[in-house]
Amino acid sequence: MVTRQRWQAFWGSEVAAAVDAGSDSPAVERLFSLLDERERSLRTYRRARLVAGSQGQPVLSPAFKAMSVLDSEIRQLEDRFGLTPRARAALGISIGQARLTLDELNRASIEAVTEETANPRLEEVV
C-alpha cells in the first residue's frame, strides 16, 4: 500500500517530468521494488527486533541488516532521479526545469538552428 502511494506520488510529481518513461523504467522500477522490500523488512523488524541466535542468545533481527543494505541502494537511485532537494541541486534540476519536455527542448534547438541559417552573414560564408 505504501509503495503504491509512493509510486503514484512520484509519477505525479514535477521531478518525474525529467524522467524518460521508456529508457528509465528499469531503474525506476528497481527503486520502487527496493522501497517495497525495505517496507517489508521494516514490518518484520518491528514484529521481532531480537531473534534467537545460533546459540540461543538474543541477536538483532537480520531484517535490520537487510534494511541497511536496501537503504544504501535506495539512496543511490534517489540521487540519480533527483528525489531530494540536495540531489536535485547536484543534478542542476530546479522544479521549473523539470517541466521542460523533450519536445520543448527540441523545438528550442530547431529555432536556434533556424535563426543561424537565416543569418545573411552565414549565407555569404556558405
Image (cartoon, rainbow, N blue to C red):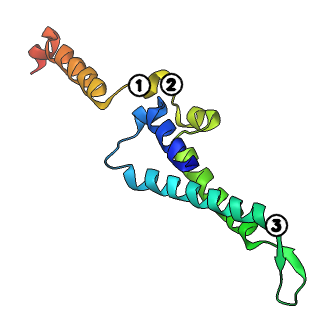
Asked if disc 1 and disc 3 are in contact, CB closer than 8 Å, the reply is: no
Indicate the secondary structure of the residue bearing disc 3. Answer: loop
The reply to whether dot 2 and dot 3 touch (C-beta < 8 Å) is no
Residue where numbered disc 2 is placed = 95
Instruction: Classify mark 1: helix, strand or loop.
Output: loop
The amino acid type, in three-letter code, at marker 2 is Ile
Q: Mark 1 sits on what residue?
A: 99
- Across and down, in percent, residue 43 comes to 69, 60
What kind of residue is marked 3?
Answer: Arg
- Residue 65 vs 20, above or below: the answer is below
- Residue at mark 2 to residue at mark 1: CA–CA distance: 7 Å
- Disc 1 residue type? Arg
**Residue ID for mark 3:** 49
Determine whether 18 is above or below 27 in the image.
Answer: above
Choose top left, top right, bottom left or bottom right for residue 121: top left
Kindly check if marks 2 and 1 are in contact, taking CB atoms under 8 A apart as contact.
Answer: yes
* Separation of residues labelled 1 and 3 (CA atoms): 44 Å
CA separation in Å, label 2 and label 3: 40 Å
Q: Residue at x 82, y 66 (%)?
A: 49
Residue at position x 72%, y 68% from top? 63
